[in-house]
Image (cartoon, coloured by chain):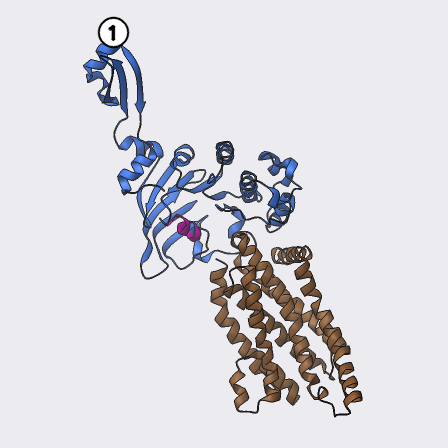
Chain colours: A brown, B blue
Amino acid sequence: MKAIRLSFFHMLKLVRQDRMLLAAGLAPLLAGTAIHFGVPFAEKIRIRFTGLPAILSPYYGLFDVFFSSITPAMFCFIAAMVMLEERDDHIDRYLSVTGLGRNGYIVSRIGFPALAAFGVTAMLLPVFHLTPLSVGAILFLSLTGSLQGVILSLLIVTISSNKLEGMAVTKLASLMMLGAVIPYFVPAPFSFVCSFLPSFWMGKAMMEGTLLYLLPSLAAEGGWIAVLWNPLCKACR
Amino acid sequence: MIQVNHLSFRYTKKPFIQDMNFSVAEGEIFGFLGPSGAGKSTLQKILLGMLPNYQGSAMVNGRECKNHGSDFYESIGVDFEYSTLYEKLTAKENLQFFSSLYKRQTRAILELLASVGLENDADKRVSDYSKGMKSRLNFVKALLHDPELLFLDEPTSGLDPTNSRLMKDLILAEKRRGKTILLTTHNMQDAAELCDRVAFIVGGTIFALDSPHNLIMSKGAAQVTYTWLDHGEQTASCPMDKLSEDTRLHMLIAENRLQSIHSSEPTLNDIFMEITGRTLV
């Protein structure tokens, strides 16, 4: 465990030396500020000038889902970029034959960042939320958001072979966050076409105000992780 | 230290390593010689526990490689052919990080750097290092936790003669410290100089396994070639073990007419080609 912890801290040191990754790490604060203050302000200004009824406030829950996805996505994107850089330098293979081991390496680069993302999301969501959220809802969104971040990491690391490809895959894989929009705009049963996306269940939970959708969300995330696990192990060989 | 019995492995349906058997004793330098794609790196990966889907048995330090525990790598040091260093960090930062990954007491970083002449470059970023410096740093990285078993993959590949000599001296110094060393190379001169025993590998099969000396001697005696002047320079050859029967050579020696004389032993590469029908490159 000591080696895993030190390997994680070492990753943070590498991130501090990379301005792009450091900026990505601070992005959740910017996004949270923009959502918490910018969206209601924009809504108020629009109502004042047009006199039309509110069009954004019915979807504030959706903004909370997005925020709870952005923080883990950024954290896991950063970790995935570090992994790709380590792969470029053949360091991932070397770390697998040190006291850290392959599993330790994966835990320090995917598990710990997801855990950190969970903690940070759970702390920031009560600050930047737009709708009233219970403790259960905060934990639900933080957990499912973090696991979605793990999926993003796995997709980046298994599909890309270098940092440049990683950027492209990140853009594509980030689209999976849009599943949260589906329950709001697509009626059932057609909306269930997107039920394989964890964000779909996050959106549905916020729209219907029930945390029962935690279970299908976790099941979808478990499925994704199970499918991507073997390619990850092969990629780290 | 290493015991391999009936080892087979396949990436696809076609076997890549077939029924390999060998053992490596403690304190021995054992070399795998073979051309690219022969299966040397795959074998190394199996012994390092990176490819668990093999058939047969591969034991390292008394443990089956596919079932190794978390402390398996505490007694193993690996020096891959390519650099495995953080380019943006200094040599000292690299070694500090890698040494932190082991439970056992690690060797003093500055002493290790001094042993390869890098003590004055400890605070220089690795990206500013030359290839020779990176190779030396890569090598001492494998020694950080003072492992009993060293896996060295093409340790002199791409090095100039000076750095190559330095690297070979470092390897021999580790042998004197009692380390067991597994060397993967296609450089037969390195193998002949460093290894106690070598295994010729082609197509995932061991074709021969013995000491370099025995392999060379098993394939006939050296030839002696000599020249003399007789209406121009004349040349003749004779097997070393038939020298006493060469009357012309005796006569030339008696008359002090020899212009030159030298022996030429077959090299390990010659033996490799003869046994496997392949070259080493």
Q: Which residues are magenta?
A: B39-46
| Dominant secondary-structure state across the stretch colored magenta | helix
Q: Viewer-proximal residue, B131 or B68?
A: B131
Q: Viewer-proximal residue, A101 or B238?
A: B238
Please tell me whether residue A145 is drawn above or below residue B100 in the rendered image: below
The image quadrant where one finds the N terminus of chain A is bottom right
Q: Position of residue B153 (x, y in %)?
A: 46, 44
Q: Position of residue A70 (x, y in %)?
A: 66, 73
Q: Position of residue A226 (x, y in %)?
A: 50, 72
Q: Viewer-proximal residue, A76 or B101?
A: A76
Few, some or many residues within 10 Å of mark 1 (<14, 14–19, 20+): few
Say which residue appears at 34% left-offset and 35% top-offset.
B268
Rendered image quadrant of residue A124: bottom right
Amino acid type of disc 1?
A: Glu
Label 1's element? loop
Q: Position of residue A47 (x, y in %)?
A: 77, 88
Q: Is residue B41 magenta?
A: yes
Q: Is residue A202 magenta?
A: no
Q: Which residue was labeled with disc 1?
A: B255
Rendered image quadrant of residue B123: top right
Rendered image quadrant of residue B271: top left
